[in-house]
Each structure stands twice: as C-alpha cells, then as structure tokens.
Image: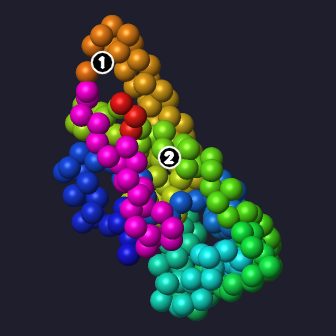
Amino acid sequence: MFIAREDYWDKRFKKAGLPIVGDDIKSQVGATIVHRTLARLFADRGVEMVRTSQLNVGGNMDFYNMLERERLESKKISKTNAVTSIMDHELPASDIYIGPSDYVPWLTDRKWAHIRVEGQAFGDVPAQPGAEARGVGLAELGGHRDRRRALLQARPEPRGRRAVGRPSSYLMKSPHNQRPDNIARADTESSSRATRACRDQAGSEDDEGEGQDQGHRHGLIVDGGGGAAPAPVTPPP
C-alpha cells in the first residue's frame, strides 16, 4: 500500500493542512541513488537502455520478512518506480528487475546490491556498466531521517501546510511527484533555508513574549517499503 504518491491521499492531507513526505525512505548513498544515476547518465549521454537489473541481498529482518513474496511486492514496486521514473523511455516489464532477492543470515544488518545496466550506444555499440553497492541497514538512513524530521518540524505556512512536498523526491523513493535528483536537491536546500528562517522568526517572537501556539500539527512519515505503518512526528513546543 502506498500513501504519499496517491492523489486520493494527497488531496486529503492538503485539505487537512498536514504535510506528508513520501513512501519508502532513500539511503544517502544506496542502491537506489546509484541505479538512478546510471539510468540518468545513459539518457544524458544518448545511450538507449535496453535492460537493467538490481539484485539485493541482506541479513536483517527486512530481508527475512520479504522471503514471503507478498511482503516483497510493494518494495519491488517502490524501488522499480524510483529508477524507471528517471528514464526517458519505458522498458518492457521482462527487461527490468529491481528488488530484494534473498536473505543471507551472515550479512546481519548489511545489505549488498548488484546493479547492471545494458544499453546501445552510437553504432549499436553495447554499453554495459555495472556497480556493487554495500551498506549497513539503518545507519545509512540517519542523515535523511534527520533532514526529513527538521522539515516536518518547521512552523506551518500561512495556509497550514509546511513546505515538504518539493524535497520529497530527494528523500523518498515513492513521493507524489518524481523529480531528477539535481532538481530535487535544489528544492530540498530551498526548503531547508525556509525552515531555518521559520525557526529564527519563531525564536524572535518567543523572546519578545509573542511566541504563542501556532497550531502545530502532526506530520506523517511513511517508511519501510511503502507498506509500513505511518509514524507520527510531533514538533517540539
């Protein structure tokens, strides 16, 4: 089940004046961002991608739970969409596979991704770069979790909706709107500056005795492969 990327839920959150960041958090430098970079590189260099794969193995409970194929489905959709959304053309379903592949107990909280991209360059010359990404479970999510939390803790905008929609595609695999990573990063930096400005203004109001309750609302973070339960985050007073 996805929430943030669906129009139905997006409209309900907008109506309530609540922010929603996205489904399935990205690692700072993980398999998804490496795969997206390779896919975008092909398009930017005029190489037509003809097939691609990303095989993921890990030793934590996420990978153990996904041995049940029905638990794997939403994660596979999320990771696949994060890569295909950055491409200039669609691939047949038979020519793309992206998703968790198996559970390897001795990896413990580590996870390895084997990425392969095949394409045709000028003169039908094959282009077949590959990459291996290795990471450590929750550790590589820390930076994006902190930035995401800071965005949610910003003061409400005049209409009651915080500026978290634009950086969603930088922080999450399945946001409401996918953007190229360079644009998503610029949007995130812009939102971070706005957040700091809001906090500075709120601090000066409090110093003057005017820092009244601005009607803080709870924000919703949807994490864990698009199917995990929402986790509320309450801004500090």
Sequence-first tag of 1 and 2? 2
Residue nearest the viewer, comparing 186 with 159: 159
Q: Specify whether 190 is left or right of 8.
A: right
Task: Identify the residue under disc 1.
Answer: 211
Is there CB contact under 8 Å for labels 1 and 2? no
10 Å crowding of disc 1: few (<14), some (14-19), many (20+): some
Q: What's the mark number on residue 148?
A: 2
10 Å crowding of disc 2: few (<14), some (14-19), many (20+): many
Callout 1: helix, strand or loop?
loop
Q: Is residue 231 magenta?
A: yes
Q: Which residue is rendered at x = 68% and y = 86% of the image?
A: 102
Where residue 17 sits in the image (x, y, percent)? 24, 45
Vertical arrangement, residue 200 with respect to residue 18, above or below:
above
Q: Which residue is rendered at x = 25% and y = 38% of the image?
A: 160
Where is the C terminus found, in terms of image quarters?
A: top left
Where residue 225 sits in the image (x, y, percent)? 51, 71
Instruction: Decide if residue 59 is in sight here.
Output: yes
Please, what is the three-letter code of the amino acid marked with disc 2?
Arg
Q: CA distance from mark 1 to mark 2?
A: 24 Å
